[in-house]
Amino acid sequence: MRLNRAIFAIELQASTRSVLLVSTFTALRSRIPASVIVLEPLAERAAITRAAAGIGLYAGAFGVTFGAVAVRAGLSVTQAVAMSAVMFTGASQFALVGVLAAGGSLLAGVSAALLLGLRNAFYGIPVTRILRPRSVRRALAAQIVIDETTAMAVAQPAPRAGRYAFWVTGGTLYMLWVLGTLAGALIGGEINTTALGLNAAAPAIFLALLWPQLCQKRGAAVALGAAAVALVLVPLVPAGLPIVAAAGVAILAGLLPDRRRGEGQDR
Amino acid sequence: MTTLWIAIIAASLGCYGLKLAGVSLPGPVLNHPRVQRISGLLPVAMLTALVVTDLFDANEHYTADWHTLAGVGAGAIALRFGRSPIVVFLVAIAVTAVTRTI
């Protein structure tokens, strides 16, 4: 229909033609989502890069703390850095060295780390839907599937921006986390993350990235349910499990039939 | 090789295996409508739970760090005013740090 209108316009007098062409152009524009218009991706990418830099900086600061804590718990500098580079999941790393520092067994430390790492398996599902990675890229992507990269990837309106957000956040975070760990392990001193207000960093960025979904009815309902389940479970189960239980809330909500669309309609 | 190294390697392999399992679901499973719906809801559920457990710690009874809560609250207000994630992030950190000096 749009094409017909353009051809029709060419057959008209110049004066009327321009008016019609303009109206056709605006009609075209209104149908294209903002993110597709040429200049948008640049601005979008800059915003993603800024957020990734912020995330990288707080991760770097906590990396310094991790390095110092790890060395104090009895790890060598090599072991501390190896943990950050190979394990690369902050909560699990802190759990393992925490158990060691408290004089717990290695087995207890490893199981605590695995319980906290379990949530990354669930993050893999939405991440794969955005990245669709294969072979080597899949192996690389797996290593950086954590809270921050997942949150950044799913917060972008288009898959293309999501992929960019995932790799930029993952790359920045990985570099600064490992470098921070090295610095902390070598110096043995910590950055006072508490005084710097960095405890608010992760919750604030997650809240900001989730905001559009929290403003929707379904997203808000699932978030409320997940928050309630997590809060109830926190004092009852080992660390890491409340978040896995929250995944259960998402699974239950996803299994409920969506009445507005009906089962038959989605493919 | 010390037992400490063995523990580090075991935990690292385990954590990587969990991540790899997550990104290895076959296409047909991922394209299933139910999996698509669940996939869309997983991050909002899990990250909300993460935020909540970050903000409210609990051993025998619930405790919260009021400075952090104030900072994240200030960030939420910035969100209401349509600020971008990085601004929300900076506001939250700044407010938390400032309230701590009081």
Image: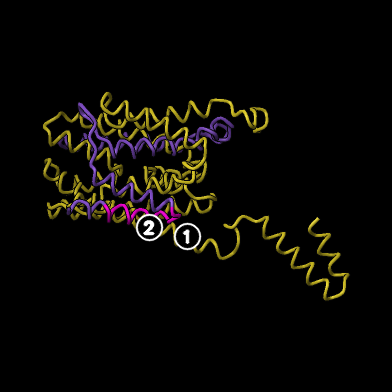
Mark 1 — residue?
A45
Total numbered circles: 2
Which stretch did the figure color magenta?
Answer: B81-95
Indicate whether residue B86 is drawn in magenta: yes
Q: Based on the displayed image, in which of its 4 quarters is residue A97 positioned? A: top left
Residues B70 and A38: in front is B70
Instruction: Determine the colour of chain B.
Output: purple
Chain letter of the yellow region? A
Residues A34 and A102: in front is A34
Give the side of residue A16 with respect to residue A27, left or right.
right
Judged by depth in the image, the label closer to the viewer, 2 or 1, is: 2
Name the residue at 54% across, 34% down.
B37
Above or below residue B72? Residue A238 is above
Give the side of residue A85 with respect to residue A12, left or right.
left
Chain of the residue where label 2 is placed in the rendered structure: B
Indicate whether residue A34 is drawn in magenta: no
The percent position of residue A94, horizontal first and vertical second, equals 22, 40
User: Residue extending furthest bottom?
Assistant: A14
Residues A131 and A248: in front is A248
Name the residue at 39% across, 45% down.
A207
The percent position of residue A133, horizontal first and vertical second, equals 49, 45
Q: Amino acid at mark 1?
A: Arg
Chain of the residue where label 1 is placed in the rendered structure: A
Query: Is the residue marked by circle 1 packed among few (<14), some (14-19), or many (20+) residues within 10 Å?
Result: some
Mark 2 — residue?
B87
Residue A87 numbered mark, or none: none
Q: How would you classify the magenta stretch by its main secondary structure? A: helix
